[in-house]
Image: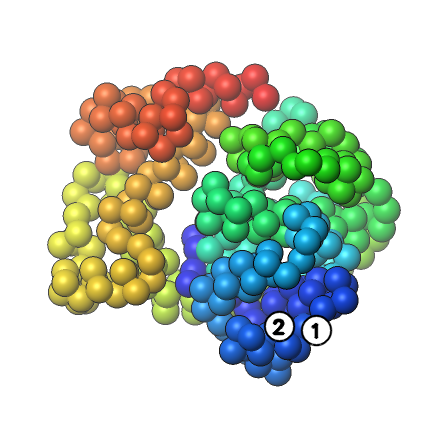
Amino acid sequence: MATDTFLASFGMVGLRIIDSYGLNSRRFASSLEMSPQAVANNNTRLSTDLVDAGFMHAMTLIADPAFGLRAAECWHPSDLQALGYAWLSSGSLSTALGRLQRYISIVAGRATLDCAYSEEGVRITYDSGRGNTPLGYAMADFGLSLIVGMCRTNLRGPLPLCSVHLKRPSPSDRLPYERFFHCEVIFEAENDRFVLPRKVLDRQLPTANAEFVQFFDDILVSELTRLSGSDLVMRCRRFLLENLSSGESSEDRLAEAMAMSRRTLQRKLVERGVSYRILLDRLRHDLAKRHLISRSTSLTEIAFLLGFSEQSAFARAFKRWQGISPSDFRVRQASQ
């Protein structure tokens, strides 16, 4: 579930990228009215709007369109705080990725991660929450390269990738992507993802430490609970998730659950760049894709679980979201 804030120390990765291109990261931070001291502070959370502004500014300053790939060489576990150390202490890449999927919102705000397991291995799909836009493309480069870099750190060596798919248009120079991922990269894809082979998922990691990981997990659970209780968008999503299948979710009921008037809720959501309809659509879209990929639920059951009165209404909504029917989406996923 996405939040409207991100961990300030996570911004250190971006500032190191700025420095790596010979630019002045302190001046860059100041141009965004952001104090470098605040970024380095372990307890500070900043608005995700600042992330967007930072990426947009970097895109105007850096000629290299693949600058986000440098995130892999510019991260440190302390940038992710408890999540970074829990990652390093994980017993395997499988458990590490599961941990990242659960807690990514603590450090990266609106970003989400989905790990889908199959006979081939695990498909890691990253969504920055910025859509099919130049900003979204740059953030996907950053996010996926960071995750790949984290995996390589845990393995202490090469990471064999089965495939990489990116939503961004095919660049004039594909080499930076192929050199970084060490495999063929497919552009103009449906989503941003890479696939890891099963043989590396359960390998015992040299940095594994069961005692440490339990300690950091306790911190992460506490932090996620705190964010869940304080972030309006997350609380709205949770209420909608719990009430979708009942068919009783409405803007009035949501406002009542949030202990505010409908008008106040509308205003507060607009301040966060969303609305009741947008939240409901995004939640239904996310859940629909997960149910369709798993193949264990029929289209009629999915329609019911998402709160649609009939399958045809679900089919129309899904075609609006994805441009294809739910059944075609399921067939396409099965063939990938």
Quadrant of the rendered structure where residue 317 is? top left
Disc 2, SS: helix
Instruction: Decide: is 224 above or below 130.
Output: below
Residue at left 77%, top 32%?
A: 183
Q: CA distance from mark 2 to mark 1?
A: 6 Å
In this rendering, position of residue 153 left or right of residue 142: right
Residue 216 appears anywhere in the view: no
Q: Quadrant of the C terminus?
A: top right
Q: Amino acid at mark 2?
A: Phe
Q: Which residue is mark 1?
A: 24
Residue at left 14%, top 63%?
A: 263
Q: Position of residue 221 (x, y in %)?
A: 51, 63
Query: Which mark, by number, is residue 28?
Result: 2
As rendered, which of 63 and 203 lies closer to the eye?
63
Q: Amino acid at mark 1?
A: Asn
Quadrant of the rendered structure where residue 178 is? top right
As rendered, which of 232 and 177 lies closer to the eye?
177
Whether pointer 2 and pointer 1 mark residues with C-beta atoms closer than 8 Å, the reply is yes
Query: Which mark, by number, is residue 220?
Result: none
Q: Identify the residue at the far right of this view.
A: 157
